[in-house]
Amino acid sequence: MKKLLWLDDVRNPFVMSDWLLQWSPEYHYEKDNGTHEVIWVKDYGEFVDWIQENGLPTEIGFDHDLGENIAIEMVRNGTNKKVARKIKKEAPSGFDCAKWLIDYCVEHKKGIPQFFVQSANPVGKKNIITLLNNAIKHI
């Protein structure tokens, strides 16, 4: 079964199916034929944990700016918005996940899975794509 690891703190791939349709259309129809599985992880820790427990997925969708979900929850629970924004900025990004993925692939002698970047941050998106494409050339 093909597996898409969807890294995004805000965009729910199951509710906002237009995201899946745009970035990875074959997974948009996973419920119809049962041949594809989408796994939603929201932060660096969940990303690392899932791969360590399950191995590499078929494909990974990267968001760059992570931590928005944490900041929103903190504000809901009474944390000052300024404090929540600071914590969000300190959260590891999708770029950090991509760097970890490269180390994992080198250590386990695996190739980089197919990937795409659904981030709204154009600089972050370019950085992830450049990093992973360079890794593919050298692994």
Image (cartoon, rainbow, N blue to C red):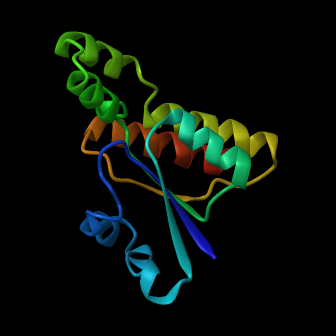
Q: Closer to the camera, 89 or 23? A: 89
Residue 112 percent location from the top left of the image: 64, 53
Residue 59 percent location from the top left of the image: 54, 62
Residue 24, visible in the rendered structure: yes
Q: Residue furthest bottom?
A: 33
Residue 139, visible in the rendered structure: no
Q: Is residue 110 above or below residue 23?
A: above
Image-quadrant location for residue 72: top left
Quadrant, the N terminus: bottom right
Q: Name the residue at 22% across, 22% down.
A: 75
Q: Is residue 36 above or below residue 105?
A: below
Residue 28 percent location from the top left of the image: 37, 75
Q: Is residue 23 above or below residue 74?
A: below
Residue 117 percent location from the top left of the image: 39, 51
Image-quadrant location for residue 61: bottom left
Q: Name the residue at 42% across, 23% down.
A: 91
Q: Name the residue at 38% across, 46% down.
A: 8
Image-quadrant location for residue 15: bottom left
Q: Residue furthest front?
A: 77
Q: How many marks on residues?
A: 0
Q: Name the residue at 29% across, 32% down.
A: 68
Q: Residue furthest left?
A: 81
